[in-house]
Image (cartoon, rainbow, N blue to C red):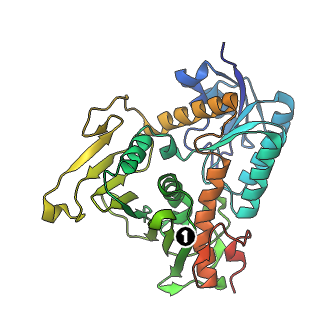
Amino acid sequence: MPKTYRVAVIGRTGKGDYGHGIDTVWKDPAVAGRVEVVAVADENPAGRDAAVKRTGAKTAYTDFREMLDKEKPEVVGVGPRWLDMHHEIVSECLRRGCHVYMEKPFVRNLEEADYLVRLSEMTHTKLAIAHQTRYTPTLPVVKKLLAEGKIGTVLELRARGKEDARGGGEDLWVLGSHMMNLMSAIAGPPTACCASVTLGGKPVTKADVKIGNEGIGPLTGDAVQATYSFKDGVTGFFASRRGQAGSPSRYGLQIFGSKGVIEFMPGYLEAVHFLGDPAWSPGRSKAQWQRISTNGIGQPETIKRSNGLHTGNVAAVLDLLESIESNRQPLCSVYEARATVEMILAVFESHRQGRPVVMPLENRKHPLTLLA
């Protein structure tokens, strides 16, 4: 019989809450038979009571450390979106031998990320992060099409954030993290980054650095432009400008090849399309975009489409449990989480140095704390 895991959930009502369903995923029928939610922790009394009702937890705590010590969960859902407590919460979980499924982004800087990677290795614990596009069944199909040369030689990856009121540095962290994670899933780890960060059209300086929303830490810039170098001559781009959101949104990743384009919208079951056009210009070529399903280009879908965020969480949790039992890394592991943070911070590090920077970054401190 499959093992039943003791699960605890940590939230912070009003300070990142429970993320995008990190608390309720454990009640899904596909997961519920594998887990028992033993407790929740939340410093907010009203939020804590509501979480007990949502999760069916048997007990609740104000202090998450007390919960970890008394309940001894095997898996912990770390829900808060805010970053200011991620390092502390996850450290306490891993130190006690708990596996973790957590909301993104990972942590605020590479010193925190490096510490959690080492701690995960030392305690033989698994950490999975909710970059849900990494779990979509369409991603392996896209990677197979790329390997088969369906769009020819891959030349460029282009991504943009949502470019709403968070555009620029905050967009890079909050939505850009999904794009960075997807870029590395397609092209592997980048080898270099060249970027600029501006505010009001001028390069940012130390005086422009503020503490960002949602516990992000040091933050600046209403516009960012970044170029990444990947293996095999592939170039990646990311940009975001505040107040320039499109309708429909431009938020997503486009993969440009010598024979065509694949467009990847982020999310577990969001649209993915193929354009067989070497000119990348359907207005001239009259080529038509075709939907990519789990069965291939223009084929019927083989899976039921439902609530994307919830279904993505279910897929991620099931993968985490399987990774624990088979002693492998989750599809979006602690290493992937760190790599995403590194791509984000490489933008600020390149701006700080005024030149391209080699990756992995030599500087592990937050670049914005070192601006002259």
Q: Is residue 244 visible?
A: yes
10 Å crowding of disc 1: few (<14), some (14-19), many (20+): many
Q: Nearer the viewer, residue 292 or 48?
A: 292
Q: Which residue in the rendered view is the most extreme toward the top?
A: 1
Examine the image and state in which quarter residue 22 appears: top right
Residue position for label 1: 169
Residue drawn at the location 67% of the way across and 29% of the way down: 326
Q: Position of residue 68 (x, y in %)?
A: 82, 35
Label 1 sits on a secondary structure element that is helix
Kind of residue at disc 1:
Gly
Residue drawn at the location 78% of the way across and 45% of the way down: 121
Q: Quadrant of the N terminus?
A: top right
Q: Position of residue 159 (x, y in %)?
A: 42, 63
Q: Is residue 2 above or below residue 330?
A: above
Residue drawn at the location 63% of the way across and 28% of the way down: 55
Q: Is residue 24 visible?
A: no
Q: Is residue 178 above or below residue 310?
A: below
Q: Quadrant of the C terminus?
A: bottom right
